[in-house]
Image (cartoon, rainbow, N blue to C red):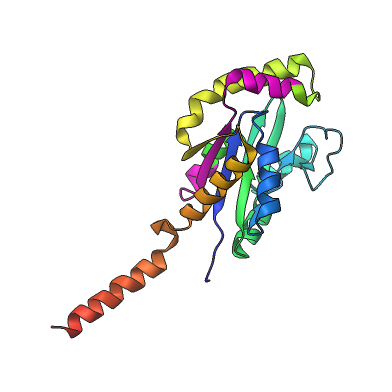
Amino acid sequence: MEHQGILVVVSGFSGAGKGTLMKELLKRYDNYALSVSATTRQPREGEKDGEAYFFVSKEQFQQMIEEHKLVEYAQYVNHYYGTPKEYVQQKMAEGKDVILEIEIQGALKVKKRFPEALLLFVTPPSAEELRRRLIGRGTETIEVINARLLRAAEEASGMEAYDYLLINDDIDRCVEEMHQLIKLQHRRTAYHLDFLSRMRDELCHLDENNK
């Protein structure tokens, strides 16, 4: 296979602007595929099944776990989220770089199963900006917002596990930074083992001929 897509995991605090970042990245470049997660939470206004998420019941989600149909799954604010395996594998085989927008729990599970995956963490420039963005969405009660801020404080201890940090204070710059980091990841030796093996063989052959 000439070109195999890579796996990119994007996490960040709820309200950091991950969704906007992903939409802009996919609009500008055609070599990406955004994995659609399955979730047991209810759709927000305007969200369609199969686009924002696959909305399933807890019983359906449990069945997906038992049948090993998920790359990873995690619980977040009383709901389950998971990444369907078939879509990810199909798109990577097509040469697409597949982006998983998932929580820290799931990201660390993916890293264990796929050590070559690129992990990016998105954060606003300050905690106060995060709070302002959450309130500004106008989609959740103050109780849910406070729960998300509490969760963010817990998640902050896991940021060091990621390969790169993206501070989302300017969407255009942040999109370009993400794109460049993914391009750079393609050059890692782990993705070119066949080439490295062939190069070693050719060099050994040249050395033998020169003796």
> As drawn, which residue projects farthest toward the right?
45
Residue 11's x, y, as percent?
59, 36
Q: Quadrant of residue 80?
A: top right
Residue displayed at 57% across by 26% down: 125
Q: Is residue 71 visible?
A: no
Q: Is 175 drawn above or below residue 138 in the view shown? A: below
Q: Quadrant of residue 77?
A: top right
Q: Is residue 210 left or right of residue 130?
A: left
Q: Is residue 161 visible?
A: yes
Residue 52's x, y, as percent?
77, 43
> As drawn, which residue projects farthest toward the left?
211
Q: Is residue 166 left or right of residue 26?
A: left
- The count of marks equals 0
Q: Is 197 drawn above or below residue 130 in the view shown? A: below
Front-most of residues 107 and 164 = 164
Residue displayed at 71% across by 52% down: 27
Start-end of magenta stretch: 110-135
Whether residue 118 is in magenta: the answer is: yes
Residue displayed at 86% across by 38% down: 46
Residue 144's x, y, as percent?
74, 19
